[in-house]
Image (tube, grey):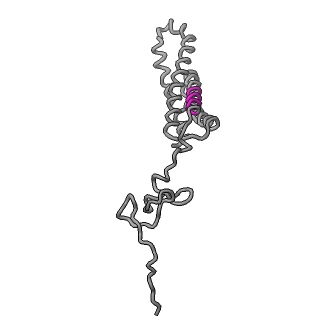
């Protein structure tokens, strides 16, 4: 029969600095605080606590001012084109708008890099909406010039024309936003 002797040189278990009721043998690789397995994050050279393991700047969601201006400009430009075409093509804009949203995100990826996050989504959605309003207004005015003669004969007013054209603009904006959101994937 063999006897087992306990080696008393083993260190005593530590207590997690966030959860004092949990024993641990893990320490943060940077600040040397004792951490339990639920508080530990895998860092580049070992385990880190939540404070030391959080990146200073997230490369996917941080935007430089130049990137914000470029993203907003592209979104407004594509939105304006979609809004203008929405006045001309009507319900067909469901397809064109969806692919225009995907094209917009692809153009953004190529011009400013692959950026994601809530800020980028907000810039893209607001840019599309502003662009659709601007392009739709231009489309309304250019189309109304052609219909003015018809309107004089029938009593069709500009307000009637705007109300009749509004669903096309909403469809164009919604399809473009949906296409862009599908490519951005938060």
Counting from the top left corner in percent of width and height, residue 93 is at 56, 29
Counting from the top left corner in percent of width and height, residue 68 is at 55, 32
The answer, for residue 160, to whether it is visible in the render is yes
Furthest-left residue in this view: 21
Query: Where 111 falls versus 146 (above or below)?
Result: below
Q: Is residue 74 magenta?
A: yes
Furthest-right residue in this view: 110
Q: Could you tell me which residue is drawn at 52 percent across and 36 percent down?
A: 120
Q: Is residue 131 magenta?
A: no
Q: Could you tell me which residue is drawn at 48 percent across and 17 percent down?
A: 162
Q: Nearer the viewer, residue 151 or 127?
A: 127
Main secondary structure found in the magenta portion:
helix
Q: Quadrant of residue 80?
A: top right
Query: Where 184 falls versus 50 (above or below)?
Result: above
Counting from the top left corner in percent of width and height, residue 122 is at 49, 34
Counting from the top left corner in percent of width and height, residue 113 is at 61, 39
The answer, for residue 182, to whether it is visible in the render is no
Query: Where 99 falls versus 3 (above or below)?
Result: above
**Numbered disc total:** 0
Q: Nearer the viewer, residue 116 or 166?
A: 116
Magenta-tinted stretch: 67-77
Q: Could you tell me which residue is drawn at 52 percent across and 48 percent down?
A: 55
């Amino acid at each position: 029969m063999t006897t087992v002797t306990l080696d008393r040189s083993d260190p005593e278990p530590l207590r997690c600095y966030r959860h004092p009721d949990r024993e641990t043998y893990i320490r943060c690789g940077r600040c040397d605080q004792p951490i339990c397995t639920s508080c530990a994050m895998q860092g580049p050279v070992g385990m880190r606590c939540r404070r030391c393991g959080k990146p200073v700047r997230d490369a996917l969601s941080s935007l430089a001012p130049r990137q914000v201006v470029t993203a907003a400009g592209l979104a407004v430009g594509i939105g304006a084109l979609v809004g203008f075409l929405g006045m001309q093509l009507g319900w067909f804009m469901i397809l064109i708008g969806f692919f225009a949203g995907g094209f917009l995100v692809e153009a953004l990826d190529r011009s400013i890099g692959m950026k994601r996050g809530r800020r980028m989504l907000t810039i893209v959605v607001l840019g599309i909406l502003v662009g659709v309003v601007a392009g739709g207004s231009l489309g309304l005015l250019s189309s109304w010039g052609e219909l003015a003669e018809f309107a004089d004969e029938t009593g069709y007013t500009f307000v009637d024309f705007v109300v009749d054209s509004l669903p096309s603009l909403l469809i164009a904006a919604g399809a473009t936003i949906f296409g862009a959101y599908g490519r951005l994937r938060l």
